Image (cartoon, rainbow, N blue to C red):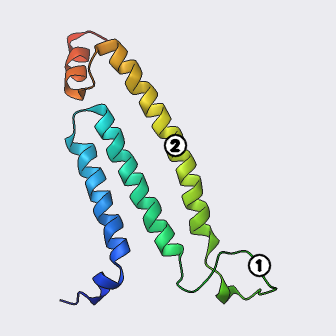
Amino acid sequence: MNLGNLFANYQEALAMIMFAIGFSNLLLQKNLIKKIIGFNIMDSSIYLFLALKGYIKGHSAAIVVDGVQSVDAYINPIPSGLVLTGIVVSVSVTALMLSLTIRLYHRYHTLDIDRITLEVKKGGF
């Protein structure tokens, strides 16, 4: 087994581990706030992965400086734009999830998803 590629790309492996932590947190936690945190960890790992894929060692940002117009001098700006757009959308989705969580807490006086689901099935909705 060749571990050279793993050590050369340890940042991508870290992003995948972060995604797995967030995904398992999203699936296994019963508290809604902890689920939202898991969702945000997953988002952050995706943004980290995209940023790493767009980076080229030794190249600079895609801003023409000193008249250098060669494509080989700059990194690809598309992953950076995707990450920036994703962060804006993620903040909006997180704000919506937190506001819905507050409403659920005021209605059911708990953040446990199992207890809320049980209450809804009983007809408490």
Name the outermost residue toward the right.
67
Q: Which mark is residue 8?
A: none
Q: Residue at x 37, y 72 (%)?
A: 12
Crowding at label 1, few (<14), some or many (≥20) Cα neighbours within 10 Å?
few
Q: Which mark is residue 91?
A: 2
Circle 1 sits on which residue?
64
Q: Residue at x 33, y 77 (%)?
A: 10
> In this image, 99 relative to 77: left or right?
left
Name the kind of residue labelled 2 in the image: Val
User: Which quarter of the figure is the C terminus placed in?
Assistant: top left
C-alpha distance separating marks 1 and 2: 31 Å
> In this image, 80 relative to 30: left or right?
right
Name the kind of residue labelled 1 in the image: Val
Q: Residue at x 22, y 39 (%)?
A: 29
On the image, the x and y values in percent for residue 117 come to: 24, 22
Does 18 appear above or below 104? Answer: below
On the image, the x and y values in percent for residue 53 come to: 48, 74
User: Which quarter of the figure is the N terminus placed in?
Assistant: bottom left
Q: SS at mark 2? A: helix
Q: Residue at x 73, y 74 (%)?
A: 63
The answer to whether marks 1 and 2 mark residues whose Cβ atoms lie closer than 8 Å is: no
How many marks can you see?
A: 2
Tell me which label, 1 or 2, sits earlier in the chain: 1
On the image, the x and y values in percent for residue 27 come to: 24, 44
